[in-house]
Every structure is written in C-alpha cells, then in structure tokens.
Amino acid sequence: MKSMNESLQPIGMSRYGSAERGAGLRKLAAVTQIKWLSISRNAMIMIGPVLVIGMVYACKILYGINSESDFVPFLTGTLLNIGITMNICAEGFIMVGTSIAEEKENHTLRALMTSSITGVQYFIGSILIPFVMLMAVNYIVLLISGISLDIVPWVPFFLVSMVVSLTSCVLGMIVGICARNQMNANLISYPFLMVFMMIPVFGNLSEGLHKISGFLFTGVMTGMTERLAAGEKYVMSPLDVAVLFGELAVSVLVFLMLYKRNGYEKD
C-alpha cells in the first residue's frame, strides 16, 4: 500500500508546475505591458500605421481605382505593394528596433535580462504588440485598396502575412541589439529598408530586380498581391515556402547569436 507522502507527491508536483506556468505568464504579460508603454509613448512610431492606411486610402480615391480602366490592376497592385511593404518594413524594423534601443539607452535592457525574466519571455513579449499591429494593418490595407475580396485566398494570405510580419519583427530585434541608441537604430534600419522594401516595390520596373524580389520574404508578399490585383489565383509555390521559412529561421539564428554575444543570455 502506498504511503500518504507517495500519494501526495504527484499532486504537489502538479500544483508546482501550474504555479510556475502562471508566474511565467505574468512575467510575459509584464514584458508585453512595458513594450506597449514604450511604443505607445513614441508618437513617431504610433503615427506610422495611420499614415500607411491614410496613404493607401487617399491614393485609391485620387487615382480612381474603383473605375473600369485597364490600368486599374497595375495601380491596385502597386498601391497594395507600397502599403504592405511600408507597413512591414518601416513599422516592423523601426517599431521593434527603436524600442529595444531605447531600453539599452536607458540601461533597462540588461536589468530585465538579469532579473527572473527569461530570454524566451523577453523575445515573445517584445514582438507580440508589433506583430499584432502589423497583421492588423496588412488586413486593413487589403480591405481598403479596392481589390476584389472574392479572389483573396484568406488562408494563404494569413500564413504569408504572419510569417512576413514575424520575420520583420525579428529583424527589428536584430537592429535593436546592434544599435547603441534610438538614432543609431534608425540608421541601421535604412539598409534593411532599401533591400526588403525598395526591391519588391520596384521589381516590376526591372527584370533583375523582379528575380531578386522572388528570393526576399517581402517579395513573396508582393508577388501574391500583384497576382490578386491582376485577378489571378495565388498558389503558394515551394520556393515561396522555402524563402518565407528559410529567412525567418536565419533571422532567428542571427538574433540568438547576437543576443548571446552581447551577454544578455543568463547563465
């Protein structure tokens, strides 16, 4: 017959595990709240999504995208590409990057890392708010662009938008880890913007740029929107899958390497 201690041991372990998970969720919520306060207090960051949405809506009215002109599919595709890539790149890189750079500048990042907060909790808490904002703006831009919603493959659009937004957030964390301060974070973001934003947007103007765009995670997104604007069905190709998940994996690995090299990983 089992002793009382042996009978109570699984119950105690279960309660301990539940308490530990609860504490982990509270720490994650605390990091997320800190990040939200940092982002919401920065007017330049908060106005970005509003400018993207306003620009897309204004251009839609200005160029009469609801008309029957043969030029409409090209205009719609271009408008979608500019709006979504601006949101993903400018907001993703800068929103996350400057937030981390601000913490470094105020000497709060290392204090967080030397506390009981784990690297995983900090990572998830840092990208959660920006990720949700990027996804929301992507959908708003799609809805107001004038594109026919009947041809939108909602599941592939969600998957591509999710991976692209997540990759952008991770690249923003790389920017923040490398930057000395907020001004430096903006400077480091420019090369990322030139590659991941300009090449897909201007890919239609050059055959060479168009080919390069197909190997960029933002290029996969713009390739999908261009087909949808032209009234064509989008099917995710093996190359699209490889580019999306490959660049996400590389971004995460680079971040982890820089994270440990800068001494933020606790022993």
Image (cartoon, helix red, strand yellow):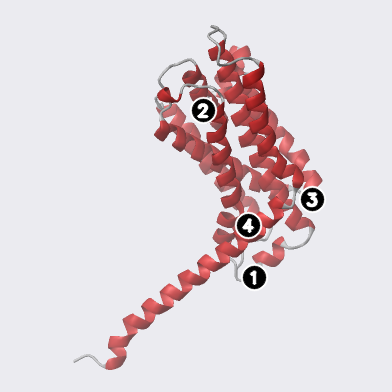
Mark 4 or 1, closer to the camera: 1
Distance from Cα at disc 4 to Cα at disc 2? 31 Å
Tell me the kind of residue under disc 4.
Lys
Tags 3 and 4 in contact by the CB under 8 Å rule?
no
Left or right for 227, reference 212: left
Residue occupied by mark 4: 260
Secondary structure at numbered mark 4: helix
Sequence order check: which comes first, mark 3 or mark 4?
Answer: 3
Q: Residues within 10 Å of mark 2 (few under 14, many from 20)?
A: many
User: Residue 33's image quarter?
Assistant: bottom right
Q: Is residue 54 above or below residue 125?
A: above
Left or right for 3, reference 108: left
Sequence order check: which comes first, mark 2 or mark 3?
Answer: 3
Q: Is residue 180 in view from this perspective?
A: yes
Residue at the spot 41% in from the left edge and 23% down from the top edge: 151
Tell me the kind of residue under disc 1.
Ser
Q: Residues within 10 Å of mark 4 (few under 14, many from 20)?
A: few
Q: Is residue 196 in view from this perspective?
A: no
Distance from Cα at disc 2 to Cα at disc 1? 39 Å
Residue occupied by mark 3: 181
Q: Is residue 122 above or below residue 254?
A: below
Tags 4 and 1 in contact by the CB under 8 Å rule?
no
Residue 220's tag is 2
Sequence order check: which comes first, mark 4 or mark 1?
Answer: 1
